Amino acid sequence: MDGGWVYLVTGGCGFVGERIVELLCQQDYIREVRVFDSVAREEVEKLSTATTRVTVTRGDIREWGALLAVARGVHVAIHTAAIVDYKDMVPFEDMRDVNVGGTENVLRACCELSIPFLIYTSSIAAVGPNTSCEPMLRGNEDTEYTGEVELPYGKTKAMAEKMVLEANGKKVPKAGRSCRSCSCWPGPGTGLSTTWSPRTRSAISPTWVREGMSSWLQPQGFKHQLSQSLPRQRDGNGGDA
């Protein structure tokens, strides 16, 4: 891309989102990182570097017009914005509006604006506790897993993840090409364990953290590595978004 790539990070002022912004700013092929968050923290803009500018826009992921405006000209969208609730304190309808409805808006924006790549940060809560109660070491996208989604939060993350994975490979009418989307589960220290469908694995080139754990979607043709910046993942145990 002439002039460098532009990334959008929804929820970029949150715990996982801010770490993503920080890591993206270390890549000199990225010209701009746009942060869209309901809580705009000015200190996130201070993550800007000589080659990568960070801009923060305050807005609600449910507001279609605001999301569409900030997403114009974006090459890669990373969707982390969500309501996280492990204590069942947030009404389910409110959580669904943000976690599911907001994700639907992001997918719609990618289609409307022909954004070719989308990464969604899901959660281990989307698959629920392992019903066999057996440890899972070095699991990957082909590992069979049986779990029960118990938390309302997990249910909304599972619903959103399903939409994202189903969108992978679908044609973007205005672009005349397919959208490539994937879902990842942030792990310890905000390393990311990624779920790739076979079509996505064949179409996009992830940068791998040493020892084989995936972290970022990176356009083919680039040799920039984030492996030196990300903490080493342990045994594939996923964390929460």
Image: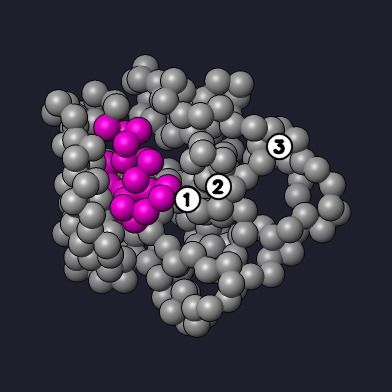
Left or right, 116 with reference to 184: left
Badge 3 or badge 1: first in the primary sequence: 1
Q: How is the image coloured?
A: one colour
- Is residue 24 found inside the magenta-colored segment of the image? yes
Badge 3 or badge 2: first in the primary sequence: 3
- Front residue of 71/22: it is 22
Q: Residue at x 32, y 36 (%)?
A: 22
Indicate the secondary structure of the residue bearing disc 3. loop
Indicate the secondary structure of the residue bearing disc 2. strand
Three-letter amino acid code at the position of disc 2: Trp
Answer above or below: position of 39 versus 199: below
Where residue 201 sits: x, y (%)? 53, 34
The residue wearing badge 1 is 121
- On the rendered image, what quadrant is the N terminus found in? top left
Indicate the secondary structure of the residue bearing disc 1. strand
The residue wearing badge 3 is 139
Marks 1/2 in contact by CB < 8 Å: the verdict is: yes
Where residue 151 sits: x, y (%)? 63, 70
Q: Residue at x 58, y 67 (%)?
A: 86
Three-letter amino acid code at the position of disc 3: Gly
Answer above or below: position of 109 versus 121: below
Answer above or below: position of 159 versus 133: below
The span shown in magenta is: 5-25
Residue 117 seen anywhere in this rendered image of the structure: no
Three-letter amino acid code at the position of disc 1: Thr
Left or right, 38 with reference to 50: right
CA distance separating discs 3 and 2: 12 Å
Disc marking residue 185: 2
Give the quarter of the image for residue 212: top right
